[in-house]
Amino acid sequence: MYDPLLEHLIELAEAETPVEAEVSLIVGGMLVTGHVVSEEKYMSSHALTRAYLELDAEAEGESDADASEEGDEEDEDDDDFDDDVAYIHLRDAQAAGGKLGFFRVALTDVSGFSLRG
């Protein structure tokens, strides 16, 4: 689902001074509630995702070195925020089945949402 307001909530969570809005999402017919957080906060919330970040940073460092050897090539999609936002991340997420903790879902899987609080 594309919704500019939902994307704006993600931008606020990713800001230098983050705003973590409380939302309810409809995902696969299930209601999920929580606070929108940055991808970085989500990724640093668990040992496995932290390890992934470290591996990704190492690989990016290697690819940056390769790119500087080949010359700088512009990526036309770098400034297109819509393409960069693929997921929404929640903390203190809950669903009918109970507490989910940190939760990540593709924006394309969100069929509706409401602001809470």
Image (spheres, rainbow, N blue to C red):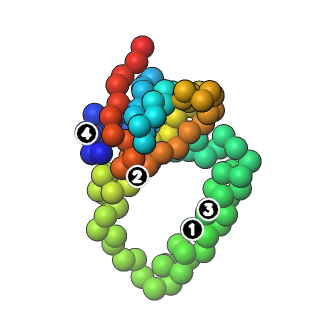
24 or 68: nearer the viewer: 24
Amino acid type for the residue under numbered disc 2? Ala
Vertical position of residue 31 compared to residue 89: above or below: above
Say left or right for 105 vs 93. Answer: left
User: What residue is shown at x 26% (from left), y 40% (from top)?
Assistant: 3
Quadrant the C terminus occupies: top left
Give, as a three-letter code, the residue at label 4.
Answer: Pro
| 29, above or below 85, in the image | above
Q: Residue at x 66, y 51 (%)?
A: 49
Q: Is residue 31 left or right of residue 82?
A: right
Q: Nearer the viewer, residue 47 or 65?
A: 47
Residue at numbered disc 1: 60
Quarter of the figure that contains the N terminus: top left
Q: Nearer the viewer, residue 10 or 69?
A: 10
The single residue placed furthest to the top in the displayed view is: 117
Q: Are marks 4 and 3 in contact (CB under 8 Å)?
A: no
Residue located at (62% from left, 27% from top): 98
**Residue at which label 4 appears:** 4
Crowdedness near tag 3: few (<14), some (14–19) or many (≥20) residues, C-alpha within 10 Å: few
Mark sitting earlier along the chain (4/3): 4
How far apart are the two marked residues, 2 and 4, measured between alpha carbons? 13 Å
Q: Which is nearer the N-term, disc 3 or disc 2? A: 3
Question: Local crowd at mark 2 within 10 Å, few (<14), some, or many (≥20)?
Answer: few
Q: Secondary structure at mark 1?
A: helix
**Rendered residue at 48%/79% (across/down):** 67
Q: CA distance from mark 1 to mark 3?
A: 5 Å
Q: Type of residue at label 3? A: Ala
Alpha-carbon distance for marks 4 and 3? 30 Å
Q: Return the residue at label 2.
A: 86
Q: Is residue 79 left or right of residue 95?
A: left
The residue singled out by tag 3 in the image is 57
